[in-house]
Amino acid sequence: SVADYKDLNFNDCVIYCDPPYVGRTGYKGTRYDYNEFNDWCMGQAQNNMVLVTEYHVPPIPHEIIWEEKVNIVMSNGNRINEPFSTHERLYKVNGGKY
């Protein structure tokens, strides 16, 4: 089944989120609301462990639990964009019992 993450609510779970990276194309080219996502993560972190992958750290309480430098090459149809380096991060949203 498919559901919007905003309609989901968990208790005593580990939640792993892999949203579109900040500054990149959202799902099917749509704009992704990161403020709304961060608010949802903060709410879920009250009763769950929330883990998120991202290049940039969010403006919410968090703890980086893993990071590594990565080289990225992205393509858009037949065009390959200039490669770039960044850091892939896995962070835990702070704010609850986990």
Image (cartoon, grey):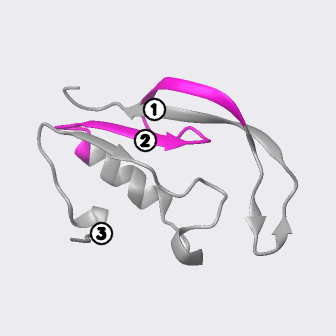
Per the rendering, the mark at residue 4 is 3
Q: Could you tell me the amino acid type at mark 3?
A: Asp
Say if the magenta span includes residue 45: yes
> Mark 3: which secondary structure?
loop
Q: Is residue 92 visible?
A: yes
Q: Is the C-beta separation of discs 2 and 3 under 8 Å?
A: no
First in residue order: circle 2 vs circle 1: 2
- Residue 92, how many percent across, how many down? 39, 31
Q: Is residue 59 visible?
A: no
* Residue at point 29%, 69% (across, down): 4
Question: Is 38 left, or right, of 13 in this rendering?
Answer: right
Per the rendering, the mark at residue 52 is 2
> Mark 2: which secondary structure?
strand
First in residue order: circle 2 vs circle 3: 3
Q: Is the C-beta separation of discs 2 and 1 under 8 Å?
A: yes
- Residue 97, how many percent across, how many down? 19, 26
- Residue 81, how many percent across, how many down? 84, 60
> Mark 1: which secondary structure?
strand
C-alpha distance separating marks 2 and 1: 5 Å
Q: Could you tell me the amino acid type at mark 1?
A: Tyr
Specify the segment rendered in magenta. Answer: 44-70
* Residue at point 41%, 50% (across, down): 38
Question: Is 52 left, or right, of 84 in this rendering?
Answer: left
The residue carrying pointer 3 sits among few (fewer than 14), some (14 to 19) or many (20 or more) residues within 10 Å by Cα, namely few
* Residue at point 76%, 70% (across, down): 76
The residue carrying pointer 2 sits among few (fewer than 14), some (14 to 19) or many (20 or more) residues within 10 Å by Cα, namely some
What residue is shown with label 1?
91
